[in-house]
Image (cartoon, grey):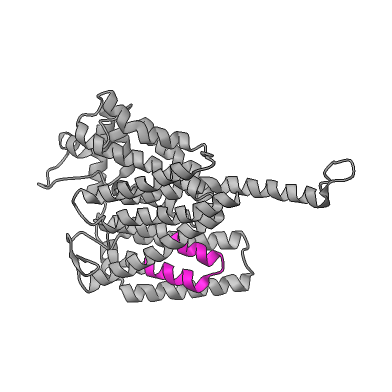
């Protein structure tokens, strides 16, 4: 066990670096935003496959494997209406399944998981600060140097995708607070909240705040610390959040929250998507085909290209069929308990909520990060049971067994 943990720690750092490599080029609208993410993740997968001494796949792997193979199945059965987009999306989903397996195996040990989470926490904090500087000092330039499209926020192509990245990272900062690192964790969370405010993503701001509230509920429910100490932690975090809001400014997000009928367009797109689902409910029209299918079901013409349904759940049901939608739903429900247990995994649920009004996981690098964290979460319950078993074994060895070899249980 110790040798495996020692090997997994550098692999965990390599896995984090591979995910960050994809995120750092996600601002590009060219092919390498996909190729870099896939190449880096594939390299880690090869190294893990060559060095793994023991493979214990979680039960959720069955679901994820079917999800990852859904696109190739559509291509093999000639179900997809437009093969090329389905081919591209099939690669994304298949690599998502690979990321899930890597997360479930490499992040099993506490040492490896902590190394991965620490790397992601500090990297995401740096990206959050860089995004704020980009918005207020040098707009439309990544890191103040590389010209980019006006829609780019930080290193992500779209503000809601950037907000989703903060949703995945903010609970890691709260996990640090949960483990007693109040100042460092609080400052990281404040930076991420400020960056989310700067992005002007309404749902992003709501969900990052919701994660904070859920964290407070968990702290109180588990009686992690005395009430007086808990109140002090809440006060410190509240001050940091208020300071972050003052630095980032609330005018832009407040203006967006005041917009009348702000989700009217999304409602119209959802109505059209529901009609698309009824046309091919079982196996879908093909992953990635929604933009090509939509014009036949559109109820209005704004003379613009509509690229996504702005509701990933509905789009999954349209492109993959109702069974594909249910596979994702079952996976998310299965991950709910360990997400709450871990604290750092709260973002896995938040992004799924965000997916009801947008398409955060359409970016491959974010999708790979989500599946990696999801894979790591599958080990939370298993590790608890393992610790209990080890504790009982240690108790018996230390004298918990009587002279007849029967364990005396309290």
For this rendering, which residue is in front, 189 or 111?
111
Quadrant in the rendering for residue 207: bottom left
Give me the residue at 59% from left, 63% from top: 220
Per the rendered image, the range of residues in magenta is: 170-192
Q: Main secondary structure of the magenta part?
A: helix
For this rendering, which residue is in front, 376 or 253?
376
Position of residue 391 in the picture relative to residue 205 (left or right): right
Quadrant in the rendering for residue 86: top left
Q: Position of residue 80 (x, y in %)?
A: 24, 29
Q: Is residue 160 visible?
A: yes
Position of residue 155 in the picture relative to residue 51 (left or right): left
Position of residue 151 in the picture relative to residue 99 (left or right): left
Q: Residue furthest left?
A: 303
The correct choice, above or below, for 87 with respect to 304 in the image is above
Q: Residue furthest top?
A: 77
Q: Position of residue 148 (x, y in %)?
A: 18, 61
Is 296 part of what is drawn in magenta? no
Q: Position of residue 382 (x, y in %)?
A: 59, 45
Give me the residue at 29% from left, 62% from top: 257
Give me the residue at 52% from left, 36% from top: 59
The correct choice, above or below, for 406 with respect to 239 in the image is above
For this rendering, which residue is in front, 235 or 186?
186
Is 188 part of what is drawn in magenta? yes
Q: Residue furthest right?
A: 403
For this rendering, which residue is in front, 46 or 252?
46
Q: Position of residue 75 (x, y in %)?
A: 27, 28
The correct choice, above or below, for 272 with respect to 266 in the image is above
Give me the residue at 74% from left, 47% from top: 393
Q: Is residue 258 visible?
A: no
Position of residue 395 in the picture relative to residue 360 (left or right): right
């Amino acid at each position: 066990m110790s040798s495996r943990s020692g090997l997994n720690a550098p692999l965990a750092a390599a896995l984090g670096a591979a995910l960050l490599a994809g995120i750092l080029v996600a601002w590009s609208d060219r092919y390498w935003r996909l190729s870099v993410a896939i190449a880096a993740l594939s390299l880690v997968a090869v190294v893990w496959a060559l060095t793994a001494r023991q493979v214990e796949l979680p039960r959720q792997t069955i679901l994820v494997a079917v999800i990852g193979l859904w696109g190739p199945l559509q291509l093999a059965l000639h179900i997809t209406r437009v093969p090329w987009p389905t081919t591209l999306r099939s690669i994304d989903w298949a690599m998502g399944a690979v990321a899930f397996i890597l997360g479930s195996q490499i992040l099993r040990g506490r040492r490896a998981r902590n190394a991965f989470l620490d790397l992601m926490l500090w990297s995401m904090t740096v990206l959050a600060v860089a995004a704020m500087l980009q918005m207020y000092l040098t707009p439309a330039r990544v890191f103040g140097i590389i010209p980019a499209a006006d829609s780019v926020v930080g290193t992500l192509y779209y503000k809601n995708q950037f907000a989703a990245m903060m949703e995945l990272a903010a609970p890691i900062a709260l996990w640090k607070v949960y483990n007693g690192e109040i100042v460092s964790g609080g400052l990281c969370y404040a930076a991420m909240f400020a960056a989310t405010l700067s992005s002007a993503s309404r749902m992003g701001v709501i969900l990052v705040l919701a994660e904070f509230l859920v964290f407070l509920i968990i702290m109180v429910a588990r009686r992690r610390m005395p009430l007086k100490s808990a109140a002090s932690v809440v006060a410190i975090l509240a001050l940091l959040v208020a300071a972050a809001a003052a630095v980032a400014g609330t005018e832009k997000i407040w203006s967006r929250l005041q917009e009348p009928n702000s989700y009217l367009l999304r409602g119209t797109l959802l109505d059209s998507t529901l009609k698309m689902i009824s046309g091919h409910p079982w196996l879908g029209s093909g992953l990635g085909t929604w933009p090509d299918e939509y014009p036949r079901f559109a109820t209005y013409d704004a003379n613009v290209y509509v690229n996504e349904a702005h509701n990933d759940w509905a789009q999954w049901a349209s492109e993959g069929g109702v069974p594909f939608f249910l596979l994702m739903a079952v996976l998310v429900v299965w991950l709910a308990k360990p997400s709450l247990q871990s604290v750092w995994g709260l973002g896995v649920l938040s992004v799924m909520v965000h997916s009801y009004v947008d398409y955060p996981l359409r970016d491959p690098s974010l999708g790979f990060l989500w599946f990696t964290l999801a894979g790591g979460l599958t080990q939370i319950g298993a590790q608890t049971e393992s610790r209990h078993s080890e504790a009982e074994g240690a108790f018996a060895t230390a004298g918990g067994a009587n002279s007849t070899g029967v364990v005396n249980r309290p």
